[in-house]
Image (cartoon, grey):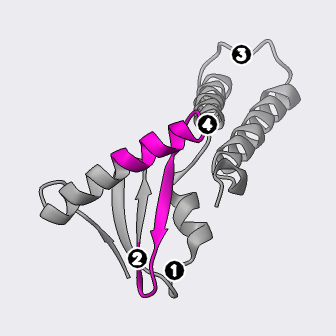
Amino acid sequence: MRRVVDENDELGKVAREDLKKGMEEAKELGFKRINGFAVIGTKGSVVHVRNKVILVDTYNTNWDSLFRYFTFFKGYLIAGVVLFSLALLMTYLSFFTSYMNYFEPGPKIYSNILLYIISIILLFMSRTKWSYRL
């Protein structure tokens, strides 16, 4: 059971204040940047992640997947998207235009495949378990 609380809801306003207080306490404890935290109760819990408040059932929640869903490395994500776009562009240029005719057929294919592989690896690395602390 997962429910995202609306900003207009009264509970949402209370949770936003709780989020601000938690961020202030995290800065006082020496954390430079915190992406979220959880207040764990006996039956239900409140999770603050990326300026959202989520109400979850404590025992039926997969905490690892919950935090992984909201946290990712932006650098890897941007690099993966840029390399994938470049690979798409190079594939189009090498097979449908005459711009890359000076390459042998092998390097035209291998360079695109290599860029696709690297970009997909970067996209998968952007959502890793090391991007948060429990």
Q: Which mark is residue 61?
A: 1
- Looking at the rendering, the stretch of residues picked out in magenta corresponds to 20-45
Residue 75, picture quadrant: top right
Residue located at (66% from left, 55% from top): 133
| Label 4: which secondary element | loop
Which label's residue is closer to the chain start, 2 or 3? 2
Q: Residue at x 58, y 46 (%)?
A: 72
Q: Is residue 107 left or right of residue 7?
A: right
In this picture, residue 65 sits left or right of residue 121: left
Sequence-earlier tag: 2 or 4: 4
- Label 1 and label 2: CA atoms lie apart by 7 Å
* Residue 124 horizontal/vertical position (percent): 68, 50
Q: What element carries label 1?
A: loop
Amino acid type of the residue that numbered disc 3 sits on in the rendered structure: Met
Residue 69 is covered by the magenta coloring: no
Q: In which quarter of the image is the N terminus?
A: bottom left
Query: Which amino acid type is shown beneath numbered disc 4?
Result: Gly
Tag 1: residue type?
Thr
Magenta span includes 35: yes
Q: Check contact, mark 1 vs mark 4: CB within 8 A.
A: no
